[in-house]
Image (cartoon, rainbow, N blue to C red):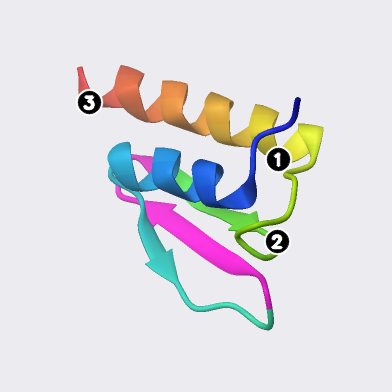
Amino acid sequence: MPKKVRELKKMLIQAGFKQVPGKGSHTNWVHPYYQGKITVSGNDSADAKIYQEKLIKQAILEVKKEEK
């Protein structure tokens, strides 16, 4: 069962990402140890796309490696 968009946002917040405004239902997330930004689309109650989950999990792993 896919995660909800709000769950992905919560994961990003816990990993230390900060939200930057986007257009419409899009939110952008940045972190000092992550190059670029992550864009999450969809309303909080919508199901997240599989590629969004993979991207966020990879970004969190990358940040954790850099923090060590």
Quarter occupied by residue 42: bottom right
Q: Are marks 1 and 2 in contact (CB under 8 Å)?
A: yes
Q: What amino acid type is highlighted by mark number 1?
A: Gln
Q: Position of residue 7 (x, y in %)?
A: 52, 42
Q: Position of residue 12 (x, y in %)?
A: 42, 43
Image check: 6 left or right of 20? right
Query: Nearest the camera: 4 or 66?
Result: 4
Magenta part of the chain: 25-34
User: Which residue occupies 62% across, 50% down?
Assistant: 5
User: Which residue occupies 79% across, 32% down?
Assistant: 50
Spatial CA distance of label 3 from label 1 is 23 Å
Q: What amino acid type is highlighted by mark number 2?
A: Ser
Q: Position of residue 39 (x, y in %)?
A: 63, 58
The stretch drawn in magenta includes residue 64: no
Spatial CA distance of label 3 from label 2 is 27 Å
Q: Which residue is mark 1?
A: 52
The stretch drawn in magenta includes residue 31: yes
In this rendering, the answer to whether 43 lies above or below 52 is: below
Q: Which residue is mark 2?
A: 41
- What element does badge 3 sit on? helix
Quarter occupied by residue 65: top left
In this rendering, the answer to whether 24 lies above or below 3 is: below
Few, some or many residues within 10 Å of mark 2 (<14, 14–19, 20+): some
Badge number at residue 67: 3
